[in-house]
Amino acid sequence: MKQPLYQKAYRAAEGNWRAAEVLYAHLAQGSWYVFYSYGMLAGLAMELYLKTIIHIEDNEYDTKRKRKRKTKSLAELYRRLSQESKLAIKDHFNAIAQTYTPLALPESIPEEVRALARDKVIMYDFCGTLRTMSEAFAEFRYAFERPHCLACVPTTPALRDAVRKRILDLVPELGRHCPQSGPG
Amino acid sequence: MMKHPLYERAYDAAQWHWRAAGILIRHSREIQDDTVMWSYAVLASFSIELYLKAIFYIEAKEPTPRLKGHSLTALFEKLRQGSREAVRQYFEALVPRYVPAPSSLPESAMAFIEANAFTTDFDTTLRMMSDAFINFRYWYQKESNLMYPSAAEVFRHALNRRIVDLVPELKSH
């Protein structure tokens, strides 16, 4: 049976987030070179989580309309959610963000990379996290061309958990699909 | 990072993404977790895009307009003839020694990499890789099976060799 688009989008988001977590474990152990890949995949996962909610809420979101509404900006995707989803995500983020340990860059990261991460003003509130992470997928990808754009946002996992919780509130059975989020 | 020439920064980024992709595939093998295989394909194909851009920037000399677009076929066509021929020759020399991905990969991951896409031909590999970055990041919107060629790693080796031919000091990176 054909899977609904939101289900496939959710599996894709979960897979990319899982991959970002695997890379983060290596980052934390000193493999600083995975920093860019980690940021890229975390940004892509966030984009797909938000698109999952759009697919759930907007049954008209098909491939034709997708072309007109194509965006990777997390801030723009968030604006497209229903008012209820926006409030739910923000409330959950505010409830959990303080409990997250800020992401600390490992000592092994070269000073030039560390300095770039510091250059960016890091905001810890909801709007700051969303705005700073908004273009992460592109910014981490092209950091070698435009390093001034690099951002490292410690509250990204809180944003991910808030968006994911909203998805599972809307479609609880998606929680049972987690182990199958790969290509199989 | 800005102190270094653009080709060097592109090359370093290519190497980092390739190594990150390697971490994902090792993770997949070790704990039989195929959830990360799409991300592996995204990173590996983006890495190959950056190797091609590095060659372009080496040959173009700076300053040069930033290359846009992810099509590997289009990027390959932008390289000078000497580089295109060298990459092809390296690929064809390496392919006979290439061993397909070990069967320790999860079954679904093996199907993902090989069943669709076992080839040792240069043009087929390039064509199959060409839009991989775009296709694999949004795989969930695709109706048909996606193909990731089994010789992608050989292609990457061929590009890497060409880069080191052009700028030998990059070998130490």
Image: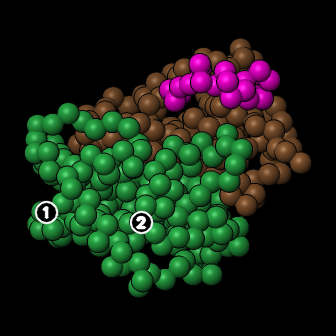
Chain colours: A brown, B green
Q: Residue at x 41, y 44 (%)?
A: B71
Tag 1, which chain? B
Residue B119: where, in percent of width, then height?
53, 70
Residue at 85% across, 40% down: A172
Other-residue count near label 2 (Cα within 10 Å), few / some / many at <14 / 14–19 / ≥20: some
Select label 1 or label 2 by which is in front: 2
Q: Residue at x 15, y 36 (%)?
A: B64
Q: Quadrant of the C terminus of chain B?
A: bottom left
Q: CA distance from mark 1 to mark 2?
A: 21 Å
- Residue B72 located within the stretch drawn in magenta: no
Say which residue label 2 marks.
B122
Instruction: Work out whether A113 lies above or below B126.
Output: above
Q: Of the residues shown, which amino acid type is indicated by label 1?
A: Leu
Which residue carries the number 1 mark?
A: B166
Whether residue B59 is situated above or below residue A122 in the rendered picture: below
Q: Secondary structure at mark 2?
A: helix
Name the image quarter holding residue A39.
top left
Relative height, residue A109 to residue A132 (above, below): below
Q: Residue at x 62, y 81 (%)?
A: B104
- On the question of residue A178 being in view, the answer is yes
